[in-house]
Every structure is written in C-alpha cells, then in structure tokens.
Amino acid sequence: MGKLVVQVCVGLNCSFHGALQLLEAIEEDTVLQAGCDVEEAPCLCDLCEGGTRSPVVRVDGEPVCGLDVARLCDLLHERLGG
Amino acid sequence: MPEIFERLRGLYSPLTDLRRRTFAALARFVWEERPLADFDRLPFEILDLRRPTYRCCTFRELSILRQRLRLAMGLPLVEEQDNRPASEGIAAAFTPAKVITAPLVQVLRAACEKCPADGVVVSDRCARCLAHPCLLVCPRNAITIGKARAEIDLARCVRCGRCVQACPYQAITQPQRPCALACGVDAIGSDAEGYATIDQDKCVSCGLCIVSCPFGAIADKSEIVQTLLTLKQRPAGARVVAIVAPSFVGQLGRLVTPAAFFAGLRQLGFDRVMEVAYGADCDTLLLADRLARLAAGRQFASTSEEALEGGVPPSFLGTSCCPSWVETARREFPELASQIADSFPPMVETAKKIKEDDPTAQVVFIGPCIAKKGESLGEPIRQWVDHVITFEELAALLVARQIDPAQLRDGAYPEVQDGSGAGRGYAVAGGVAEALVATARVRHGVEDVPWQRADTLRSCRLLLREIAAGRTSPLLVEGMACPGGCVGGPGTLLGLKQAAREVARFVERAREPLPREQGSGREGEA
C-alpha cells in the first residue's frame, strides 16, 4: 500500500497559526510516521483566506483547513486504517 | 512527569491563537495608520463577540482583550479596579521611542481563575485500603479514614507531601498553580482574594509563567507598535538594523532558510540584518581568556597547600548571556555574584558594534526572550538596543504586512555569515559552555575544564546552592532560564526539538567553527 501524502503548508499564515505544531505532532506519532510521507509545502493557495482558515493541510492532494492537532491526527489515523 | 511548561509549550492552544491574533491585528492597525478612535473596534476585529470563545461571557472576554491590547502596545496595565477606560492615554504608545517600563510581566486579574494555591486533596480514587499508608506516614497525624475516603485535616497538615507519595492509588494530590510551578524563583503568590500576584522584587521576567498559565492570565509588554513606527517614521537617511538571536533558525518554518529569514526582515523595512552570533563570538573570546586565567590560578591553588581548606568555594566563571539567570544568581547568591561574568551579553556586543559603525542607526533585537526586554530598559544598555521583540511578535508584523519569507527561499540572497559555529550554538543549552571550553583549548591550550550547566531557574538555583556549599566546584557554569536554552524561550514559534535540530544544522554551515579575533584584520586603530 502506498503511503499517505501529507503536505503541511508552512507559508507564513499557516506557520503563524499552528502548522509547526502539526508537524511536531505527526513526527511524534510513530504510526503516522510510518504511514505518511510528510512534506512541508510553501504557501501555494489562498485556501487559508489570509490566515483565517489556517493551517491548511493537503492529504493525498485533498485540502483540509483549520484543523487542530487532535483532529488532524484523527483524520490521518482514519485514512490509514481504512 | 514533564515540567509544567513542557505540557503547554509546543501546543497551538486557543490561547496561542488569541495572543497571535491580537499581535497581528494591532500591527495591522499601526501599519495602516488608522485613527486612534478606531481602537475601540480592534477587539471586535480580533474576535467575533457574538459568541464567547475563550471565557464565560463576552463582557469578561472583551475586558481582557482590551487589557491585552494595552500591554501589546507597551503601555502600563489598566484594570477594572483602576476605574478608568483601557483606551485612556493610548496615544502615548504611538511613537518610535521606547515606552515600555517595568514591570514587564503582569497578571491580568480579570483572566485569572484563582486556582487553589494550596492544600492536599483526596480524590474518589481512594479505596479506604487496609494498609492506609497515608495515615502511617503523616508526621502530624492529620489524616483519618472517613466513611468514603481518607480525610485530611488541613489545619494540622504541613503540606509535606508524604501521603501523596505513599498512596498506592495515586488518590492524593497536592494541587499547585501552573504559574507558581513554572516560576523558578518563587515569585508567584496570591492576594487576599486569591488572584495570582507576582512579586516584582523576585521576578526576573523569564516569561515561563506566561506560557504555562492555561487561562492566559499572565502577559508581558510588547514593543511591536514602537518597532513598526521606528521602521515607518525614520528620518531620511537613518538606518534601522535588526539583530537576530542565534535561536532564530527555523522559527518561521523549515522552508525559511536563514538567508530567506534575513531577506524577509529587509522587506519589512530593516536596512541591515545581523546575527547576534557575532556578539556571542566577542563574548566567547573574552570569557575564554578569563577561563584560561582562572584555570591557571586554580592549578596554582591546588598545588599550593591547603589553599582550599578555608571553606571558601573556589572561584568559577558564570556565563552572562541569559539575563534571568544572571539576575537570579546576583539576587540570591550575592556571595557568588562576583563570579558571574560582568561582560555584556551577545545582544549588547552586537548592538554596540552597529552603533560604533553608525551612531544614528536604530537597533531592534529579535529573539526568543522576554527578559531581554527588561535588560534593554536599564543603563547603559538602552543606549545601544532601541527595541526588543520576540520571534512571535516578529511573525505578527510579517503577517500584518503579508510578507512571507517562505516565498523568498529560492531568491538569490547572500549567505548569512556573521557568526562562528560556536556563536550560533549559544541558542541551545550547553552551547555557551562548549564554545568557551573549545575556545580556551584552542587558543590557550587549557585542557579538561570542569564545567556544569543548568537550565530552568530552579535547577540553576540548585546548582548554585551546591557550589555555595562546596559540594561541587566546576570552573565554568552555564546558566539558562529556559528549558533547553534559548530555543525553549517563551517567544518562540517552533517546537524545542525541531528548533535545536535547526540550530545544529546552521552551526555546521558556519565558515569558522570557533571565533577569531574580530579586530585582527583592522588597521590604523587609534
């Protein structure tokens, strides 16, 4: 099975609104580490709407906005399990 | 168990969010030169007050936010009990001059939840066990076994904590305030009503209570308004220089290389950006020299008989870069204070260099540190360092201007090369001592310097106590107030481990591993 591609936006708005903490959380979770290809992506989109919907993460290309650590990890675990 | 600040640090909590929104909104307000009358609108731009987000009610929420804004502007706190509007006198903040005054770290009473400061609590996990070790270990006979659980007579209890340790069910806890637990100098107390208070005679502005309070009830003053106005209102020809603490690497995300970080600062309006690792190198050279002399002196003392018998602790060299550590050592161990180096810290050495080259330049220090704000208030340092902001506050300025250094990473910017590897290593606990030891070895041939270090003020005090009692006698002592060193400072954005890794990588990229004499290339000096 291929790995889940997780691109965490680390553009200014997303870094300022928690993206760096998302990266740290994924790094500390061994299951996620094994199952995901984590990339730090520069800001490529306006999905964050000037930071109001930050942080933006793309999971296998599909964007999700404004998730905190717990909800992102839940989502990733769910995707890996299914 | 992790230290209290480790539990909240590195999390992006709703409080982090609130603080950052506040800074960014204020920075935007200043940059767009909106009229002061609009100040009353600011809280509503930061929060949607149609529903309370952070507190029990919008009234409290609004009140706290106004107070936070005042502190963020660098002004003295105005609280409910002062019975005047929080917007009073805010015009005073809109100047490029320094407006912040002590105290820097303050409790917002409206936000303080009056956590119990004291007591020992038996929870319903108590099994009323037959052995009841709690009762047996209690030195004051304060525990009885009640109908449902063990009961503690708080009038007799001396808070020794032995029952907490003894309970096989972890049913007994000794609640402590997160702020007090985080404070390494025991500066947190409470007033008659139970609100947390800070004893400003003890506080050394390390800021760890700010990051540890789960209600965001402690805040510090910021110079973002004055920094922005320094950039905006500079007289023609005057230069504004940013000096950046060694812990800056990766603070804006890993994609922001040091060169892009510096380029971002230049886009923000700084004419020049310089690594404080430069000043760290000045310090390393100076202190390695002293260390060598001290080592020679001690060797002499140990060969001359009974020099140590008088019970006088042998002299050592204490590092001078962390203001909270220096303050703590001087206040609590006056007999050892003279051993702490009186040299200027790297921030000041760097700022001095800039002002020597260009006396009209304005210098803004950007770092992880709140205590540096305090350090820059005193004479003679305030003549060299005009403003101090944290990385978090810097990021707010960038967000307000929508300057994204991550987009600049591929630009052709000159490589950052102001400091040696050793100077860059100052950011991580142990780095200062290692720089000094290595430099003393290479320059002065001093081998095997016995050194010790401590991070967090509590461990710093323990170490000093050991030294004062003569139980240990290192030649070199590195003290740092923040866990893990400056990369663990309250004004950082990046997690501690990632930050330490980024610094290590940047150390490798320095042209020189150790500092070289700065003046050696200059000629014609008077």
Image (tube, rainbow, N blue to C red):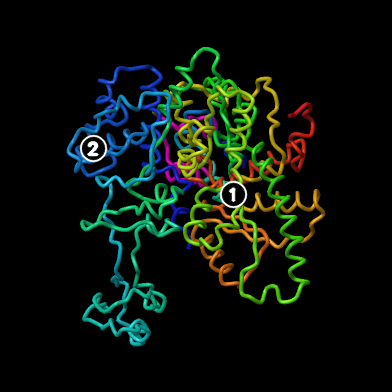
Q: Which residues are magenta?
A: A53-82
* Residue B377 among those drawn in magenta: no
Q: Earlier in the sequence, mark 1 or mark 2?
A: 2
Above or below, B493 relative to B8? above
What is the spatial separation of the Cα atoms under label 1 and label 2, in whole angstroms?
43 Å
- Label annotation for residue B63: 2
Q: Which residue is mark 1?
A: B342
Q: Nearer the viewer, residue B120 or A63?
A: B120
How crowded pointer 2 is (Cα within 10 Å; few <14, some 14-19, many 20+) is rated as: some
A64 in the magenta segment: yes
As drawn, the residue found furthest toward the front would be: B526
Q: Callout 2: residue from which chain?
A: B
Q: Residue at x 79, y 57 (%)?
A: B446
Q: Quadrant of residue B233?
A: top left
Name the chain letter of the residue that bears numbered label 1. B
- The answer as to whether the residues below labels 1 and 2 share one chain is yes
Left or right: residue B215 versus residue B289 is: left
